[in-house]
Amino acid sequence: MRRILLACLASCPGLVLGLVAPDASAHSGGVSGSGCGCHGSGDVNLSITADMASISPGDTVTMTISIGAAGANEAGMFVQSNAGSFTILGGQGLAQVPAGLTHTQPKSINGGQAQFSFDWTAPGSPGAVRFELWGVAANGNNGSSGDQYDEDAFDFVFGCNPQMFWRDFDGDGYGRTNLPLTHCEGEPPEGYAAAPDDCDDNRADTYPNAPEYCNQVDDDCDGDVDEAAIPVDLYPDGDGDGYYGQLEYESGDTVVGCVGTEGYAAEPGDCRPLDPGINPGAEEVCNGFDDDCDADVDERVRPQCGEGWCRRESVNCEEASCQPGEPRDEECNFFDDDCDGLVDEDAPCPAGESCQAGECRAGGGGGGEGGVDDSGGAATLGDDGGTGLGGSGGSGFGGGAGADGDEGGCACRAQPGGSAPWGLGLMVVLLGLARRRREESVR
């Protein structure tokens, strides 16, 4: 679930814009998120507000994160942005990490919410910023049971008029209503459209007011299928799976009519025209065949084995054929190099430094198990949002690793005898989710 908060900028002082939640308007506190390792998803109230109604390029603004949920008494968070720079404020219990800011200890929930504040400085030129926030509302029982997790995105613009856009995966000029973005008015950002309501964002020929073809598809997104439809070209479909192959296309046997005409199809790409179980719409299963006709065989469905650097995929569909790779010495790189399910444990760093979220840094953390730096100061973000993660970072730790292995290390406090606060385990999981979200957003 994502809610988009727009803060007015220099060009629109005094305008108050509220929270937009087109995909969950009935849920004032959000709906289930995508999960946080061992923490359960839940109905968590998340918000980010600015202390200035109008933000100009170069301004430094105090941002306040609020987190709350029914039955919770403490909260933690991770936040990142794709522009500008963070500065930690004293007494807020936050730390800078390569990807953004995280808490060092949970904060108590008082009056229904816990709050974390930080300063954010806008870039010197007009533009927009998106803050991605992951939050946990916990019950403080020294375990993850009963904890609730959620995530949101909040947009602010600075030095320009705001305009809403929508994620457009198929490039037809209409986007997904549930994936909005507030940006500077004008041309849509890459991958977005100025109009919403695309009912099938995987088909470039399907969008509001598109021509309605006789193909058993609601091409014009009006809720009706094939009303006053235009006939389409159909080609032989010997196996009746709704797809034709290249040879059928070149056969010269073409009719004009509607999808459903016996023996003919309107969709191309069938790589085995006589096997109804193999076509572009089929699900890939591990069987030695290219079920979905994408020129890959058993991709992403073969058995896997090993942890971290040793993670490997079987050469066939047999689990016994999967051989994990060889471990290497653990390095401070936010990755499980020695294949033990732990990230950066005992990673070597120069004298006076410790491994903190994938980097050897002075102070803070108190050891080599992914500590954080809570000493304050600014962390400037790069063009990609300042992830600070290497190409392999975040891909090898699954649900994270705790101080003593309890439930993946996301418990809300250090367990008895443990060596790391709950913030470290949660930070590892949230940074991994943040990285995965960025990767998914460009697919």
Image (cartoon, helix red, strand yellow):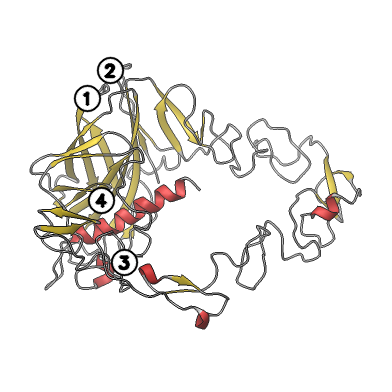
Does residue 128 appear in the picture of this structure?
yes
Q: Do the residues under discs 4 and 3 have CB atoms within 8 angstroms?
A: no
At x 69%, y 41%, the residue is: 218
Q: Where is residue 371 in the image (x, y as percent from the top left)?
A: 17, 58
First along the sequence among labels 3 and 1: 1
Give the secondary structure at mark 4.
Answer: loop
For label 3, the SS is loop
Question: Of tags 2 and 4, which is closer to the observer?
Answer: 2
Pointer 2: what residue? 14
Secondary structure at numbered mark 2: loop
Q: Mark 4 points at which residue?
A: 69
- Please tell me in which quadrant of the rendered image residue 136 appears: bottom left
Q: Nearer the viewer, mark 4 or mark 3?
A: 3
Check the image and report above or below for 411 versus 266.
below
Label 1 SS: loop
Front of the two marks 1 and 4: 1
Q: Identify the residue under disc 3.
A: 336
- The residues tagged by marks 1 and 2 sit, at their Cα atoms, a distance apart of 17 Å
Dot 2: within a 10 Å radius of its alpha carbon, few (fewer than 14), some, or many (20 or more) residues? few
Which kind of residue does numbered mark 2 sit on? Gly
In the rendered image, the vertical position of residue 285 relative to residue 70, given as above or below: below
Judging by the rendered image, the residue that carries numbered circle 1 is 59
Residue type, mark 1 in image: Asp
